[in-house]
Amino acid sequence: MEMLPTLPPGSIDFIFTDPPYGHNNNNGDLIHNREKALGRAVPDAAQPLARPLLNDGPEANDLFRASLPEWKRLLSPGCCCCCCGGGGGPDPQFARWSLWLDEVFDYKQMVVWDKGKIGMGWHYRRSYETVLVAQKPGAKCRWYDTSHKVENVIRHIKKIIPKASDHPTPKPVALAEHFILLHTQPGDWVLDPFMGHGTTGVACANLGRNFIGIELDEQFFCAATNRIARANAGTGEKVRLSPRA
């Protein structure tokens, strides 16, 4: 909320982001709980099981809703924003976010990302997440696929099996690339206001897009900066994936 007002209006062509969900990881994040269940938990205090993310408490929903008018100001008409919105469960935060997006933008679609077998949990194992797509009104949607085969279910991108040293909520580079290819062209400006470990920035480096990332946690910011620099130098991960794959 400090950095967004410093960017010029209409300067961003696309937003792809994974905002905090408000879960806070106080009882151990999914990565560490998985490692613990497999007998591989880190025993020392250097990497405690509970790794709360900044602004991932009760304030997360307020932060998301407050940022939407700034996103609209920054996007040009016809440009889109895509927000990873979690999956199902007793607190359907993706449903709230959809309504809030529709208050500010033209809500376009909820895309279901089928992450493959088998998800976390005990009942109705969580094998999917949602990506919420909204468009700034005033112009035709910027859409660069010509195959006419893009569905609202993504089946070809599998989940990451993370390590305990990773960001608690990593997303595949291929997921960001999928949407970047649909809504942008080379040289366009992509914003991720909740950058984490820089997945969106790596996707932009792979695809020749310009990138602006904002991250409150200094540790994650430094890790993202290094990761994106490696991708720009051609020494990092490169996962080019056509949306028609």
Image: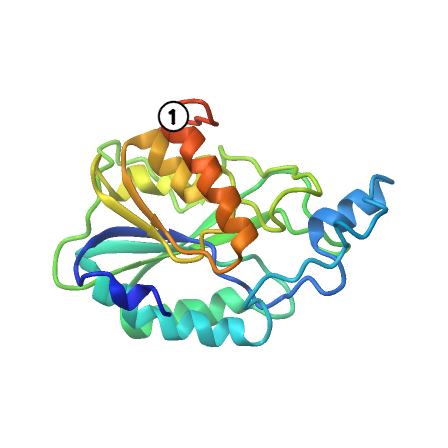
Q: Is residue 206 left or right of residue 22?
A: left
Q: Of the residues shown, which amino acid type is indicated by label 1?
A: Ala
With respect to residue 28, does 222 lie above or below?
above
Q: Position of residue 200 (x, y in %)?
A: 41, 43
Query: Can residue 168 be seen?
Result: yes
Q: How many marks?
A: 1
Q: Position of residue 187 (x, y in %)?
A: 20, 37
Residue 142 x %, y % = 19, 48
Query: Residue 158 appears at what percent x and percent y?
Result: 56, 35
185 over 135 or under it: above or below? above
Instruction: Give the left or right position of residue 158, taking residue 232 as reference.
Output: right
Q: Can residue 243 be seen at all in this image of the molecule?
A: no
Q: Report the residue at 70% width, 52% height from top.
A: 30
Which is nearer the eye, 126 or 29? Answer: 29
Q: Quadrant of the N terminus?
A: bottom left
Instruction: Decide which of 205, 244 is in the foreground and name it.
Output: 205
Picture quarter containing residue 29? bottom right
The relative height of residue 125 versus residue 117 in the rendered view (above or below) is below
Q: Is residue 192 left or right of residue 72?
A: right
Q: How is the image coloured?
A: rainbow
User: Which part of the image, by quadrant, shows the C terminus?
Assistant: top left
- Mark 1, Cα crowd under 10 Å, few <14 / some 14-19 / many 20+, is few
At 56% from the left edge and 45% from the top edge, which residue is drawn? 170
Residue 150 is drawn in which quadrant?
top left
Residue ID at (84%, 48%): 44
Find the residue positioned furthest to the top.
235
Task: Check the image and name the residue furthest to the left.
Answer: 139
Helix, strand, or loop for circle 1? loop
Residue 123: image quadrant is bottom right
Instruction: Report which residue position mark 1 lands on.
Output: 233
